[in-house]
Amino acid sequence: QGAQKFSGIIEDCCCDYETVNRLNEEVLSPSLQDLVRTPFFRYFKVKLWCDCPFWPDDGMCRLRDCSVCECPDNEFPEALKKPLQHTLSSNDLVCQGENPEAAVDRTIDTKSFRGWTEVDNPWTNDDETDNAEMTYVNLLLNPERYTGYTGPSARRIWEAIYSENCPKYLSGESCPEKKILYKLISGLHSSISIHIAAGYLLDEATNTWGQNLTLMYDRVLKYPDRVRNLYFTSLFVLRAVTKAASFLDQADYETGNPVEDLKTQSLMRQLLYNPKLQAACPIPFDEAKLWKGGNGPDLIQEIQTQFKNISAIMDCVGCEKCRLWGKLQVLGLGTALKILFSVNGQELPLQILKVQRNEVIALMNLLHRLSESIKFVHETESAVEKNLGKH
Ligand code: FAD
């Protein structure tokens, strides 16, 4: 089985695969790996308990840390209220294969969450200002990896996302606006699958974790589109980060630990104004080309509504750790969409952009996830190529 080698310009973007692989290896991956370990970036504020509004009767709330939802029935689109088509067994609902350390640890670091303006994100469903319902999670203690969450419950989530909220566009579709949401979600899905493959429980009896390359091939590498969408999503998010550079540079990263906080600031600066990045891929994605036609405002409204639904569906993810990373990454994408499509302009002036602390945390952690996925894909491609050369 061979992985396809990708080359040329990434569709609808402004840089090519080779450049992205090189920049990822030399700049993005090393900076982001350090950045997400800093106290500012490792605590994520999240509403974790289950209040799935779409499938109230499937018993999902038997899972740990879930509670039964009594959301008003009239708030959500009819299409999303379809009853479950599969019969669930209780085995489908639990995270199998987890070791006890992997349970979500809600380490509260009150120091990390002070200050910053509180603004709701128009692209997401959770009210980001609703502190009373939020809990704090140390992301370093909860790596995104295999949890054993599979079967009808997991499949139904992806099905609802794709079929109701971001249907695959027809081949030959040339309008980039119509492709964006599907490509972003598919790229995120690829990244989630790659993290499952990169951190797989190889032997339950001995609790041995490692890489599962067959799974990575079967779920992602076998489908060139899924790999392309991963690169697209990464450049889209990177563009949001560079567009918000002046905001992110000036932001308050204080957590009460001056040495660490200075390091956070300096890592951020190294990434935002990296000369290699600026020379080789200054505008990773050109959002200014979009929404130009007369129906631009309607299209943008449509994808905002669809994205909000996807964000609401995250409450239905029946495994707590998957829900944590699902919510974080969807908030990260929502923040990228907010940065790129709420305000026009090449660089955003400080006073215009209103981004919450938690949104910045989600955005940078998402970019880190995507960067690690690209690294893993590229390393696998190179290893396959080397092997083929030997035969
Ligand atoms: P799935 O990944 O469930 O895919 C379902 C269908 O979607 C496929 O059959 C295919 O038709 C289509 N598809 C797959 N990939 C793509 C793509 N990239 N682009 C377009 N279409 C695609 N499991 C864990 O072990 N750890 C986690 O951290 C984790 N996090 C999750 C987070 C979320 C938000 C969700 C919804 C699920 C998560 N899961 C996690 C479950 C995991 O994603 C899979 O659903 C599960 O492993 C079963 O995989 P599968 O092979 O049935 O295919």
Image (cartoon, helix red, strand yellow):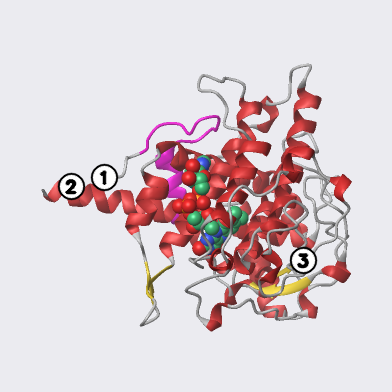
Q: Position of residue 27 (x, y in %)?
A: 49, 55
Rounded to the nearest whole Å, what is the CA distance between mark 1 and mark 3? 41 Å
Local crowd at mark 1 within 10 Å, few (<14), some, or many (≥20)? some
**Which stretch appears magenta?**
6-27
Residue 269 seen by the camera: no
Q: What's the amino acid at mark 3?
A: Lys
Task: Check residue 284 in the rendering and tell me which mark sits there, or answer none.
Answer: none
Q: Earlier in the sequence, mark 1 or mark 3?
A: 1
Q: Going 50% across and 71% down the picture, which residue do you hit?
A: 96
Q: Quick check: marks 2 and 3 in contact, CB under 8 Å? A: no
Q: Quick check: marks 1 and 3 in contact, CB under 8 Å? A: no
Q: Quarter of the image holding residue 173?
A: top right
Circle 1 sits in a helix, a strand or a loop, which is it? loop
Q: Which residue is mark 1?
A: 2
Q: In the picture shown, does residue 109 fall above or below 280?
A: below
Does the segment drawn in magenta span residue 351? no
Q: Count of labels shown?
A: 3
Q: Quick check: marks 1 and 2 in contact, CB under 8 Å? A: yes
Position of 255 with respect to 84 (left or right) is right
Position of 189 with respect to 65 (left or right) is left
Q: Earlier in the sequence, mark 2 or mark 3?
A: 3
Local crowd at mark 3 within 10 Å, few (<14), some, or many (≥20)? many
Circle 3 sits in a helix, a strand or a loop, which is it? loop
Q: Position of residue 155 (x, y in %)?
A: 55, 51
Task: Check residue 47 in the rendering and tell me which mark sits there, or answer none.
Answer: 3
Q: Which residue is mark 2?
A: 388
